Amino acid sequence: MTRPDQPAAAAASDDDLFGSETADYARYRPGLPDAAVRLLAATQHGVPDPVLLDLGTGTGQVPRALLPVLRRLVHIDLVDVNQHMLETALAILGPVRGSCTVNAFSGEAHTFTPTAPGRAPTLITCSRSFHWMSRAEVLNMADRVAAPNAVVAIMGDGSLWTHEADWTAALRGLIQTYLGNDRRAGTRGTYAGRGRSYDEELADSAFSDVAEHRFPVARAWRPEDVLGYLRTTSFAGPGLFADRHHEFEAEALRLLQGHARGGVLKEDAEFTVLLARRPGGDA
């Protein structure tokens, strides 16, 4: 898996990274590929009462995708440092959770403590957020709370900052004219370089039996949707531009419209899922 960039400093709240507006996050962030969702569900075959722990849940994309496929889920724990995100996730899951119970934990992932007795997670997921966390501590926490045959799934597919295409390169260049050459990491600083790969982090953890799965993803973006997505990111959120955000969005829209073909901007991405187990667990 591609090595994640390491933020210069951990944020106390991802309001600093992504802002407090969750509507754009829920609307514009790409979901999980169907094949990845089916893979996650398959890890729970034979588990009588699956329990999901979703770290860095955001607006609850992972549990929302899993609930219709893994109908036997009995409990979900949502973890995020952003209370606004948790409230949105709870609202989104409410109409679809059925008899599945849901708890929300506001805090850093490695500080999570289960509040539902007898609900040890059998599946721990972390999608597009592991790089923001204290990863070794998170994996130690997972070892403490997880069921004996639990599966840890670390997932991601980069971002429009890292994607290589003519239109993303031009967009990245425009962002840099406003914010400087270094990729921003919210209002707290910039990325400091590359850290250890997720594979290396897992190899040093209790969940050292790792299988990698890659799923190609083709996306078609409208220019307006790209702007909505950018508002949810740590590298181009509105708070980074101060009073120039409207100016930036107008210029970015013109740039994206110039690159669009038939009103569409194409992204060919790859969604990677690392499934990790304790040695000796089920394959």
Image: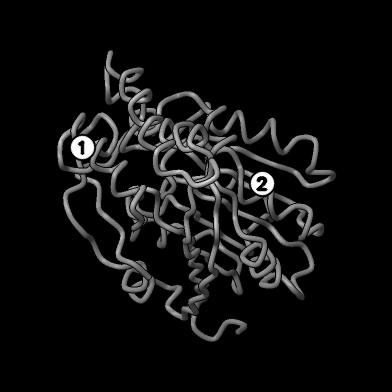
Residue at 66% from the left image edge and 62% from the top image edge: 37
Residue 89 location (% of width, % of height): 62, 36
Whether residue 16 is visible here, answered yes or no, is: yes
Kindly state the secondary structure of the residue where label 1 is placed.
helix
Of 32 and 50, nearer the camera is 32
Q: How many numbered marks are there?
A: 2
Whether residue 143 is visible here, answered yes or no, is: no
Q: Which residue is mark 2?
A: 116
Q: Are there few (<14), some (14-19), or many (20+) residues within 10 Å of tag 1?
A: some
Of 190 and 86, nearer the camera is 190
Q: Relative to residue 199, is residue 187 depicted above or below? A: above
**239 displayed left or right of 143:** left
Q: Relative to residue 251, is residue 266 depicted above or below? A: below
Residue 41 location (% of width, % of height): 70, 66
* Residue 132, disc: none
Kindly state the secondary structure of the residue where label 2 is placed.
loop
Q: Relative to residue 158, is residue 9 depicted above or below? A: above
Furthest toward the right, the residue is: 99
Residue at 57% from the left image edge and 51% from the top image edge: 54
Residue 198 location (% of width, % of height): 36, 67
Amino acid bearing label 1: Gln
Residue at 64% from the left image edge and 66% from the top image edge: 40
Cα separation between marks 2 and 1: 46 Å
Q: Earlier in the sequence, mark 2 or mark 1?
A: 2
Residue 90 location (% of width, % of height): 66, 34
Q: Which residue is mark 1?
A: 176
Q: Nearer the viewer, mark 2 or mark 1?
A: 1
**201 displayed left or right of 117:** left
Q: Relative to residue 249, is residue 81 depicted above or below? A: below
Amino acid bearing label 2: Ala
